[in-house]
């Protein structure tokens, strides 16, 4: 047991049951019964305050008691012994690509095994504007964790304009704003952008602000951005300018903002985390409501086209891109750009293909190039002729940058992980281990952060940002999204070589008061629900 984290029992009793005290009940002093009683655990309530030993009572999906059950005469027919364990709010994955829409990902087991009970989706500009359809599907078919949805600028732009590399007309801009309003009316939490990706990269700052202002017509709306240049973009605007653009969009639109998977990319940016932290802190000091989330891995996951083909060559869609490959003059320009882009990213041996195609999965771009006796640039074009490919970029992030940013009080935690298809053996391990890996690095091994600070970054901090009125904390009346963790066993097991290993140490996980994990075993219960923006009317 990590005894340095244990504190003496705090005399503490909170109750919603009415008169929950030692003499409550009838003349025979009958106990007040709760549905489940999590007994004797070290309670981390999500606030970042020091933990305390207490019992937690749950009835009908809500927390109804926190305190000393014996002295308050509270009992249950279902007592969960949590002595020596940590009891915390269910964790919130602030930037996720969990696949809740497909049968192979609906149970969300890789996330639950980390203690995650809520995921935020529709990010990087990809979220459909048909919010009601997506949330309705989750409700009808069942999901293993709670789901939050954002509407995506890239999705909207492609629906209205295709992959055109130009400014929208007034009519097209009005159409895009209508898409935003539709999604917000149906419960989306806000607008997301992927300004690094086609077609989002073709948009001006002013275009994004115009759409963000449409979202800002709705109380509580958020701007979530995969900003334009994290530091490894070919002919990009640069890291600092990219962060400043994200802050400007947040400030001028009036939205609250969050930087997705916030970190600096490229070896040339190792050790420069203070630059990004200062930009955000300066903005916050002047009143901009800007936050961030990150994961603890040194590799990204994205797609081959975005990493190796210049934006101008992708304009108009895949057919036009391939036609440019076949044009001798353009092909030479694309080759030069591809070589420059690979150099920025560390070379072809740092691009790991994790695509489901079995002839690609688990190989580096350099491996495939060697097998086919082609140059890396030729290999890229050969692969893309058959469709885009999923890739990781190894060693793009610096652990010391991540370490520095983890200490900021506005830094939430995310997986940025996509549930892999069953036929995708090699994938990014962050889907399976981001939260316990961050805990392992910065609490258990380096002892940089207190566990209550880390758990807040997993739970209450995100609940504050998303303005979830009754989640993210262990408080009376709150929804019983609860995780019970063995701190001696809470560890990530997924590696880049063997990524599909579930994390260990989550003994129990309740989602909306129902056990998704009990005694270390998943129950198969699909207890998650779609969450609409708290200020939105039920649709």
Image (cartoon, rainbow, N blue to C red):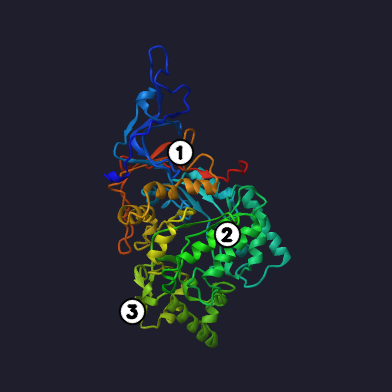
Judge the density around disc 1: few (<14), some (14-19), many (≥20) Cα neighbours within 10 Å: many
**How far across and down, in percent of the image, does residue 383 sit?**
43, 74
Q: N-terminal of the two: label 1 or label 3? A: 3
Q: N-terminal of the two: label 2 or label 3? A: 2
Q: CA distance from mark 2 to mark 3?
A: 50 Å
Q: Which mark is residue 283?
A: 2
- Relative height, residue 8 to residue 321 (above, below): above
Q: Of the residues tagged 1 and 3, which is closer to the observer? A: 1
Q: Choose between 443 and 329: the one closer to the eye.
A: 443
Judge the density around disc 3: few (<14), some (14-19), many (≥20) Cα neighbours within 10 Å: few
Q: In this image, 463 relative to 446: left or right?
A: right
Q: N-terminal of the two: label 1 or label 2? A: 2
**Residue denoted by label 1:** 512
Q: Of the residues tagged 1 and 2, which is closer to the observer? A: 2
Residue placed farthest to the bottom in the image?
329
Q: Choose between 440 and 479: the one closer to the eye.
A: 440
Q: CA distance from mark 1 to mark 2?
A: 36 Å
- Relative height, residue 37 to residue 200 (above, below): above
């Amino acid at each position: 047991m990590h005894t340095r984290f244990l504190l003496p029992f705090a005399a503490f009793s909170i109750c919603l049951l009415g008169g929950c005290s030692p003499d409550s009940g009838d003349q025979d002093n009958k106990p007040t019964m709760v549905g489940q009683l999590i007994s004797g655990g070290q309670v981390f309530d999500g606030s970042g305050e020091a933990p305390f030993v207490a019992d937690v009572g749950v009835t009908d999906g809500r927390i109804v008691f926190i305190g000393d059950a014996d002295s308050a005469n509270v009992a249950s027919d279902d007592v969960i012994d949590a002595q020596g364990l940590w009891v915390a709010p269910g964790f919130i994955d602030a930037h996720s690509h969990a696949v809740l829409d497909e049968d192979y990902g609906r149970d969300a087991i890789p996330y639950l095994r980390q203690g995650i009970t809520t995921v935020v989706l529709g990010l990087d500009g990809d979220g459909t504007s048909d919010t009601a359809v997506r949330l309705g599907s989750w409700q009808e078919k069942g999901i293993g964790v709670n789901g939050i949805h954002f509407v995506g600028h890239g999705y909207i732009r492609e629906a209205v304009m295709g992959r055109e590399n130009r400014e929208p007309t007034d009519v097209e801009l009005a159409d895009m704003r209508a898409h935003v309003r539709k999604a917000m009316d149906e419960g989306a939490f806000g607008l997301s952008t992927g300004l690094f990706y086609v077609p989002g990269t073709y948009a001006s700052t002013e275009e994004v602000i115009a759409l963000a202002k449409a979202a800002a017509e709705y109380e509580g709306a958020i701007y979530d951005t995969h900003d334009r240049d994290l530091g490894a973009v070919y002919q990009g605007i640069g890291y600092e300018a990219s962060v400043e653009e994200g802050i400007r969009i947040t400030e001028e639109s009036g939205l609250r903002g969050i930087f997705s998977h916030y970190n600096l990319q490229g070896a040339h940016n190792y050790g420069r985390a203070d630059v990004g932290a200062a930009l955000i802190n300066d903005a916050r000091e002047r009143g901009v409501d800007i936050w961030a989330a990150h994961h603890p891995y040194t590799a990204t996951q994205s797609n081959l086209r975005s990493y190796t083909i210049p934006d101008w060559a992708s304009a108009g869609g895949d057919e036009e891109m391939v036609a440019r490959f076949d044009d001798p003059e353009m092909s030479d320009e694309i080759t030069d750009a591809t070589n420059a882009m690979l150099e920025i990213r560390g070379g072809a041996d740092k691009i790991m293909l994790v695509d489901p195609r079995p002839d690609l999965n688990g190989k580096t771009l350099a491996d495939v190039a060697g097998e086919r006796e082609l140059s890396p640039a030729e290999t890229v074009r050969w692969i893309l002729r058959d469709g885009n490919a999923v890739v990781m970029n190894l060693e793009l992030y610096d652990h010391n940058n991540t370490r520095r940013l983890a200490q900021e009080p506005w830094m939430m935690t995310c997986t940025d992980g996509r549930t892999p298809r069953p036929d995708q053996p090699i994938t990014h391990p962050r889907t399976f281990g981001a939260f316990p890996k961050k805990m392992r690095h910065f609490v258990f091994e380096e002892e940089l952060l207190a566990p209550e600070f880390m758990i807040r970054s997993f739970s209450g901090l995100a609940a504050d940002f998303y303005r979830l009125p009754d989640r993210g904390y262990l408080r009376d009346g709150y929804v019983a999204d609860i995780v019970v963790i063995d701190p001696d066993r809470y560890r990530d097991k997924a590696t880049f070589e063997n990524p599909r290993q579930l994390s260990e140490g989550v003994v129990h996980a309740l989602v909306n008061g129902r056990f998704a994990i009990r005694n270390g075993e998943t129950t198969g219960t699909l207890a998650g629900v779609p969450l609409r923006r708290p200020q939105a009317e039920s649709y």
